[in-house]
Amino acid sequence: MNTPQTWFALQTRPRSERKIDFLLRQKGYECLAPTYRQKRKWSDRIVEIEAPLFPTYIFCCLSSSALGKVVSTPGVIRIVGFGGRPAEVAAEEIEALQHLVESNCLREPWRYIPEGTHVVVENGPMAGVQGIICQDADHKRLVISVTLLQRSVAVRLEETTRISIITVPGINNCGRDAESDLAIRLLRRN
């Protein structure tokens, strides 16, 4: 019998994400431990390292019958959940992170943004991914959030990237705020 598998967030010991990812893959589980390139300054040089986008967390796809086996893996603290019950990570959020890992886009951890102008990327390496648009003086970014962890990732978009505003059920998209105005200006430029 084929049991349904869903994605869960696993809390890990600090700096154990790679090791746990390796151990769980050896056990036959599908895992996701997204990283980004970070520059670190040492006394005599600057080096670029791979750092986890979600420190002390990895994502694992498994069935409810395998929860105990995963928790018994050395370095796994717990499966993230509420009231003693594991909580699933939304499939759309995992798909966006998988798409991000497969692309070579510049990415970095970002502050959690629960609300904003929701957009979908129409072209380029992130085509089809939904998120919230954010722009600073230099760059346009797509912010992808993991609601369960209350954490986000920002992906730097190229100037030629086209985006379109999407309507999210339950959010009033008629009222315009500063972020909506920004998104509309960005769309008009493209």
Image (cartoon, helix red, strand yellow):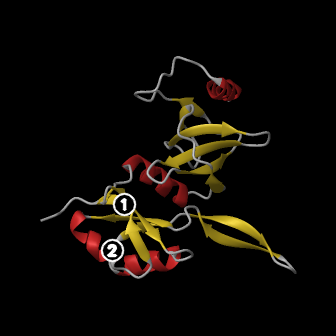
Please report the residue visible at 63 percent of the width from the left and 69 percent of the height from the top.
51
The 10 Å Cα crowd at callout 1, few under 14, some 14 to 19, many 20 or more, is many
Residue closest to the far right: 44
Residue 76's place in the image compared with 59, above or below, is: below
Q: Which residue lies at the image location 59% right of the left edge and 45% below the top edge? A: 143
Residue 160 in sight from this viewpoint: no
Please name the residue that numbered disc 1 is placed on.
8
**Which is more toward the observer, 151 or 61?**
151
Label 2 packing within 10 angstroms: few (<14), some (14-19), many (20+): many
Sequence-earlier tag: 2 or 1: 1
Q: Quadrant of the N terminus?
A: bottom left
Q: Secondary structure at mark 2?
A: helix
- Residue 113: where, in percent of width, then height? 57, 42
Tell me if residue 35 comes above or below residue 119 in the rendering: below
Residue at the far left in the pictured view: 1
**The C terminus: image quadrant:** top right
Residue 21 position within the rendered picture, expressed as x and y whole percent measured from the top left:
45, 74
Asked whether disc 2 touches disc 1, contact meaning CB atoms under 8 Å apart, the reply is: yes
Estimate the x, y position of residue 61 in percent, counting from the top left: 34, 63
Q: CA distance from mark 2 to mark 1?
A: 11 Å
Left or right: 49 as drawn, with respect to 6: right
Residue 122 spot, x, y in % from top left:
54, 37
Q: Which mark is residue 142?
A: none
What's the amino acid at mark 1?
Phe
The residue at 42%/73% (across/down) is 77
Taking the image as shown, residue 190 lies to the left or right of residue 12, namely: right
Secondary-structure class at tag 1: strand
> Label 2 amino acid?
Val
State the residue position of label 2.
70
Task: State the residue in front, 137 or 115.
Answer: 115
- Give the residue at x 49% y 80%: 19
